[in-house]
């Protein structure tokens, strides 16, 4: 599954209350974010039952604040509308997979 650009307008309907989602907060000026996005895109191909989104923290300031994404990149893991885990910075693939296995 592709990583989909998400805005505040679409947030509630996309993340909703059913299922799991991964939200990557990034900014165009953020070099570590440029390394993280291809990793998230690659992982999204393996976990087709989970929705993957990218959110531009500069454009979606209120959403970034609401989910406490003040350091970039920030990856937020949501299950059934509830934040289950957060990873901050350029984390290795294994850490992401570990959280995905936990939230299913």
Image: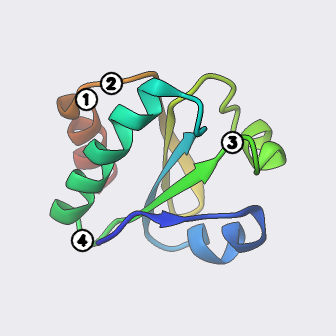
Q: In whole angstroms, how far apart are the C-alphas of marks 2 and 3?
A: 18 Å
Question: Relative to 1, is 57 on the left or the right?
Answer: right
Mark 3 against mark 4, which lies toward the viewer?
3
Mark positioned earlier in the residue sequence (3 or 4):
4
Do the residues under discs 4 and 1 have CB atoms within 8 angstroms? no
* Residue lying furthest right: 62
Q: Earlier in the sequence, mark 4 or mark 1?
A: 4
Q: Secondary structure at mark 4?
A: loop
Query: In front of the other: label 1 or label 3?
Result: 3
Q: Are marks 3 and 4 in contact (CB under 8 Å)?
A: no
Tell me the element at label 1: helix
Say which residue label 4 marks: 48
Using the image, tell me which numbered label, if any, was put on residue 95: 1
Q: Tell me the residue at 60%/38% (across/down).
A: 27
Residue drawn at the location 74% of the way across and 41% of the way down: 58
Side of 14 where 52 appears, left or right: left
Residue sitting at x 44%, y 70%:
19
User: In this rendering, would 52 be left or right of 99?
Assistant: right
Point 22% across, 52% down: residue: 43
Nearer the camera: disc 2 or disc 1: 2
Q: Are marks 2 and 4 in contact (CB under 8 Å)?
A: no
Q: Label 2, label 1: how many angstroms apart (C-alpha)? A: 7 Å
The residue most toward the bottom is: 13
Q: Which residue is mark 3?
A: 57
Question: Is residue 45 toward the left or the right of residue 72 in the image?
Answer: left
Vertical order, 13 against 52 (above or below): below
x and y percent of residue 47 in the render?
22, 63
Q: Which residue is mark 2?
A: 91
Q: Nearer the viewer, mark 2 or mark 3?
A: 3
Residue 84: percent from the left, percent from the top?
Answer: 49, 43
- Of all residues shown, which one is farthest toward the front? 29
Q: Which mark is residue 7?
A: none
């Amino acid at each position: 599954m592709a990583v989909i650009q998400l805005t505040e307008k679409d947030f509630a309907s996309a993340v909703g209350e059913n299922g799991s989602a991964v939200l990557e907060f990034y900014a165009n000026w953020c070099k570590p974010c440029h390394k993280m996005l291809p990793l998230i895109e690659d992982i999204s191909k393996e976990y087709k039952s989970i929705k993957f989104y990218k959110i531009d923290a500069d454009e979606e300031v209120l959403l970034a604040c609401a989910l406490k994404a003040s350091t970039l990149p920030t990856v937020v893991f949501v299950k059934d509308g509830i934040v289950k885990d957060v990873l901050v910075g350029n984390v290795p693939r294994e850490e992401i997979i570990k959280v995905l296995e936990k939230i299913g």
